Amino acid sequence: MQTKRIIPCLDIKNGRTVKGINFEDLRDAGDPVDLAEIYSEQGADELVFLDISATEERRKTLAKLVERVAERINIPFTVGGGISTIEDVSILLNSGADKVSINSAAVKNPDLITQISNRFGNQCVVVAIDAKEVNEQWKVHLVGGKQATEIDLFDWAIKVEKLGAGEILFTSMNNDGTKAGFANQALAKLSTLVNIPVIASGGAGNKKHFLEAFQQGNADAALAASVFHFKEIEIPELKQYLSTNTIQVRI
């Protein structure tokens, strides 16, 4: 049985870690390099770094900041934000990232998924999907959640796997920042439709929410931000709780 992963997420804007609710009302959460080091030492399984305004501002992810983070951690590191070409991927991997996360660019140019997968291996490609449930339909959103599409979450997930994605990072915009729990029904459906790992994102508020994401949502990993940044949940304590509740985690 594969161990479940706990992944802190650093949402970066102007070189600082930020966190909002439903993708809005961002507030400062600290220095990304310091936070990354803390999470690595605490036993996080991986780290995700998302330059959340890179696509909207039409610029590249901050490669120098990626380098500084990579120097201070010893866990797998995924970087996303503003990636639209193979060259972008190459720069980030050379700066210390282990994987890249693509979102808006994957929708606009699905072939990019295949190109990255063919060149660097599918384990390197995380397709991030931000989706919102409206009238019982989950629709994909782009540009940091600002641009709605008519693309169905589940159809898109199946397609990205076929194109060469190695993992899906699904963020429920309805749940994001609410601390009311993950979108477990959607997660469970995703896990039955694809054969690649699904990372749950959006809604973590307490330790039980992580347990539910694994038990009810069948997620392979659970990602969170504010509960870790503001020390509402400590990673060692969370892993101990999950282990006590028969979830296989690396302690």
Image (tube, helix red, strand yellow):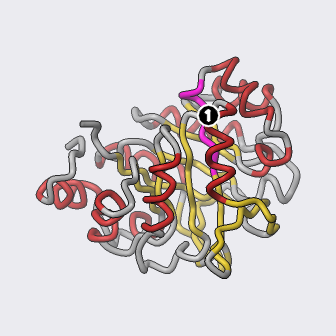
Relative to the observer, which residue lies in front, 143 or 36? Answer: 143
Q: Pick out the residue farthest to the right.
A: 58
Q: How many numbered discs, if any?
A: 1
* Amino acid type of the residue that numbered disc 1 sits on in the rendered structure: Val
Residue 41, horizontal then vertical, whole percent: 32, 44
Quadrant where the C terminus is found in the figure = top left
SS at circle 1: strand
Q: Position of residue 87 (x, y in %)?
A: 80, 26
Pick the residue in front: 61 or 151. 151
> Does residue 236 sit above or below 136 in this rendering?
above
Instruction: Write down the quadrant of residue 215 in the picture.
Output: bottom left
Residue for point 28% across, 68% down: 207
Q: Is residue 31 left or right of residue 127?
A: left
Estimate the x, y position of residue 21 in percent, counting from the top left.
Answer: 59, 78
**Quarter of the image that includes the N terminus:** top left
Q: Which residue is mark 1?
A: 125
Judging depth in this view, the residue of 221 and 237 nearest the camera is 221
Q: Is residue 209 left or right of residue 146?
A: left
Residue 10 location (% of width, % of height): 54, 55
CA neighbours of label 1 inside 10 A, class few (<14), some (14 to 19), many (20+):
many
| 244 or 7, nearer to the observer | 244
Q: Is residue 120 magenta?
A: no
The residue at the point 62 percent across, 34 percent down is 125
Task: State the extent of the magenta-drawn residues as a range.
Answer: 122-128
Q: Quadrant of residue 160?
A: top right
Furthest-top residue in this view: 119
> In the rendered image, which quarter is residue 144 located in?
bottom right
Left/right placement of residue 53 relative to residue 194 reads right
